[in-house]
Image (cartoon, grey):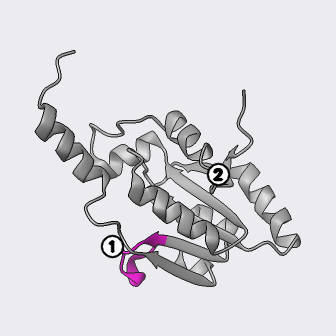
């Protein structure tokens, strides 16, 4: 069964054009979201409160591996998109294949761009295409890297 929240780049551009005609406030965030954790969910929930529609863009498997290394992703993009689409606060999920969502943002021009508080404003890709950038404070100690470290620490090499 096809999930209507998961869109191609072409489809999300069409959807956003229509939503803008309806004067909907579009909020956009992006990332790898390789291992979904409470920090991600908190960011999505806050982002949704900033507008009418929340679009989450994720790096493709290939671009994620380029950013994080050849052992990533841990969770393939088809699974990541389905996990994100299952969250009620997310309206649409789209995959981008580049290292950054610059091209996608240049086409969508959402109202608000949300990123984690670890990003300096001048380093946020696509900020010139939006009316406002919102930096969400990180949830202390919650990150994919910390989760991976914890799993390795607790379980080491898993043989089964």
> x, y percentage for residue 76?
45, 34
In screen coordinates, is 147 left or right of 82? left
> x, y percentage for residue 116?
41, 70
State the residue at coordinates (51%, 51%): 58
Question: In the image, which disc is placed on residue 75?
Answer: none
> x, y percentage for residue 69?
27, 45
In screen coordinates, is 13 left or right of 105? right
Q: Are marks 2 and 1 in contact (CB under 8 Å)?
A: no
Q: In front: 84, or 32?
A: 84
State the residue at coordinates (41%, 55%): 38
Screen quadrant of the N terminus: top right
Query: Which element type, helix, strand or loop, lies under badge 2?
Result: loop
The answer to if 123 sits in the magenta stretch is: yes
Q: In front: 123, or 98?
A: 123
Mark 2 and mark 1 lie on one chain; the one further toward the N terminus is: 2
Q: Which residue is mark 1?
A: 118
> x, y percentage for residue 117?
37, 75
Q: In front: 135, or 139?
A: 139
Q: In whole angstroms, how far apart are the C-alphas of marks 2 and 1?
A: 25 Å
In screen coordinates, is 128 left or right of 3? left
Within 10 Å of disc 1 (Cα), the crowding (few <14, some 14-19, many 20+) is few
The image quarter in which residue 35 lies: top left
State the residue at coordinates (62%, 45%): 85
State the residue at coordinates (67%, 52%): 92
Which region of the structure is painted magenta?
A: 115-124
Query: Which element type, helix, strand or loop, lies under badge 1?
Result: loop
In screen coordinates, is 37 left or right of 155? right
Q: Which residue is mark 2?
A: 88
């Amino acid at each position: 069964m096809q999930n209507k929240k998961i869109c191609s780049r072409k489809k999300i551009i069409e959807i956003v054009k229509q939503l803008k005609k309806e004067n909907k406030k579009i909020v956009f965030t992006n990332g790898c979201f390789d291992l979904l954790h409470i920090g991600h969910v908190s960011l999505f929930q806050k982002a949704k409160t900033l507008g009418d529609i929340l679009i989450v863009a994720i790096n493709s498997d290939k671009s994620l591996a380029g950013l994080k290394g050849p052992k990533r992703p841990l969770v393939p993009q088809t699974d990541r998109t389905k996990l994100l689409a299952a969250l009620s606060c997310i309206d649409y999920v789209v995959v981008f294949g580049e290292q950054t969502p610059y091209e996608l943002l240049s086409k969508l021009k959402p109202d608000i761009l949300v990123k984690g508080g670890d990003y300096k404003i001048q380093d946020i890709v696509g900020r010139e295409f939006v009316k406002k950038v919102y930096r969400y404070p990180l949830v202390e100690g919650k990150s994919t890297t910390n989760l991976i470290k914890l799993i390795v620490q607790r379980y080491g090499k898993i043989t089964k």
